[in-house]
Image (cartoon, grey):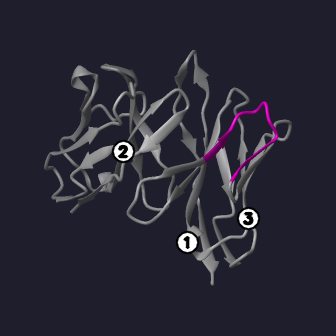
Amino acid sequence: QQQVKQSPQSLIVQKGGIPIINCAYENTAFDYFPWYQQFPGKGPALLIAIRPDVSEKKEGRFTISFNKSAKQFSLHIMDSQPGDSATYFCAASKDYGGSQGNLIFGKGTKLSVKP
Amino acid sequence: EAGVVQSPRYKIIEKKQPVAFWCNPISGHNTLYWYRQNLGQGPELLIRYENEEAVDDSQLPKDRFSAERLKGVDSTLKIQPAELGDSAVYLCASGQRYEQYFGPGTRLTVT
């Protein structure tokens, strides 16, 4: 049973565009939602994360929008650059009394930013 | 600050052979994770350690996989014997509280 559904599977945008990647989760106990960026041959790198007590978080050109009632969250990349071309993963986990639980990952979105 | 270190980076073995992966987490991180990432998929947890204790190994195929984290620092993941379906990238991550930081992974090819 896939607990985090991610879409689209792939995305192509022009430089300067705003790609949007969406994720939906099922388990209402999840309380931590990170996004990871992965380049070929590298491990996933933590990009930005959000807790369900806020609806939006911005870090540089990356923004997470969170809709608790719909159980959905999304990543927006402002002024996208060719260097942003990578695979992006959303994930979710829940707290276990001070220790982070296991991350449940989506299947990933391969983003290509054309110059 | 040094990141998560993994070795080897690549490994090619024949089926039925054993293989081991090593991980050195970020200094001070008590929680260590091993994930497996199949091609075109997100990482999936194999085992999670809190210090020396394996607190979640429910997804670890215990008939052929084993792991240890002696002294609560470095960890080793072993597969014996390897099967063709074990070909994947094996990722180690460490963290404190919510944030997890991944190493570069070991790409295993079983022929």
Q: Residue at x 73, y 64 (%)?
A: A78
Dot 3 and dot 1 within a common chain:
yes
Up/down of A105 relative to A54, above or below: below
Q: Chain of mark 3?
A: A
Q: Outermost residue toward the bottom?
A: A115
Q: Residue at x 34, y 20 (%)?
A: B51
Q: Which residue is mark 2?
A: B3
Q: Is residue A34 left or right of residue B5?
A: right
Which range is magenta? Answer: A48-59
Say what amino acid the circle numbered 1 marks: Gly
Dot 2 and dot 1 within a common chain:
no
Q: Residue at x 72, y 37 (%)?
A: A26
Say what amino acid the circle numbered 2 marks: Gly
If you read the primary sequence from the N terminus, does the residue marked by circle 3 or circle 1 appear first? Answer: 3
Label 3 crowd bin: few (<14), some (14–19), many (20+), radius 10 Å: some
Q: Secondary structure under badge 3?
A: loop
* Numbered badge on residue A83: 1
Q: Is residue A65 left or right of residue B80?
A: right
What is the CA distance from the residue labelled 3 to the residue labelled 1? Answer: 13 Å
Q: Are marks 2 and 1 in contact (CB under 8 Å)?
A: no
In this view, the residue in front, A67 or B56, is A67
Image location (x, y in percent) of residue B91: 37, 47
In this view, the residue in front, A98 or B35, is A98
